[in-house]
Amino acid sequence: MSPPELSVILLTPDNYRTIHRTLAHLRTQTARDQLELVIVAPAAEPVDPSFPAVRHVPLRDLTSTAAARAAGARAATAPVVAFVEEHSFPQPTWAAELIAAHRQPVAGVGPAIVNANPATLTSWANLIIEYGPWLDPVPTGPVEHLPGHNSSYKRDALLAYGDRLEAMLDAESILHWDLRARGQTLVLAPAAKTEHFNFSRLGSSVPLRFYGGRLFA
């Protein structure tokens, strides 16, 4: 079996039922045989054997998604790592497009973002606030920032931060600023699309926006 070209890092604070829908979409990837799944969770559970490579990273107390993503990146073996969320669902050619884009001398590649639950204005408002610059369709080419929690990076570029990696992943805009300051290039791959599920009710969206802004500040 050939070594994986892309390690997909997926987090769950409890069990694999939380990530089952994202796993189902990863199962449909046209480049599935080039993937390594890296699942950061309190305990390992069986995964569909059709995935050629799966790594389980035990993290008993998942209180920091940045620390969990950093642990996943360190455990990955592919030259490129992609972060995905349990509420973001990659379309079938997502992985293949990211792999192809990373053959360029770039540090990071982001996807186009599609609304997975477009029925309400609140869903659209939340999506635009978080991912407005990357809504499908997007042009290809260099950008200043990539979609947070849903983008891919050269693994070596992340590991170069050493013990600082968790801090850089707390708010990925900080990572993007620093990578570009180091002369690295970030690009979008418009054909790599992921469907993002958003908060769709106003009552739950208000605290989300408040605490999200407070974290970034």
Image (cartoon, grey):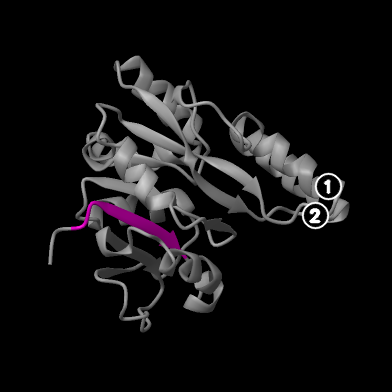
- Find disc 2 in the rendering and name its residue: 200
**Vertical relation: 118 (above or below) 62:** above
Q: Nearer the viewer, residue 69 or 105?
A: 105
Q: Nearer the viewer, residue 70 or 153?
A: 153
Q: Is residue 77 visible?
A: yes
Q: Residue at x 21, y 45 (%)?
A: 79
Q: Amino acid at mark 1?
A: Thr
Residue 109 lies, in percent from the top left, at 39, 35
Part of the protein shown in magenta: 4-11
User: Does the magenta portion include 7?
Assistant: yes
- Find disc 1 in the rendering and name its residue: 122
Pointer 1 with pointer 2, Cβ within 8 A: yes
Q: Provide the secondary structure element on which disc 1 rests.
A: helix
Q: Earlier in the sequence, mark 1 or mark 2?
A: 1
Q: Residue at x 46, y 63 (%)?
A: 62
Q: Nearer the viewer, residue 110 or 73?
A: 110
- In three-dimensional space, the C-alpha distance between marks 1 and 2, rounded to whole angstroms, equals 5 Å
Number of other residues with Cα within 10 Å of mark 2, as a class: few under 14, some 14 to 19, many 20 or more? some
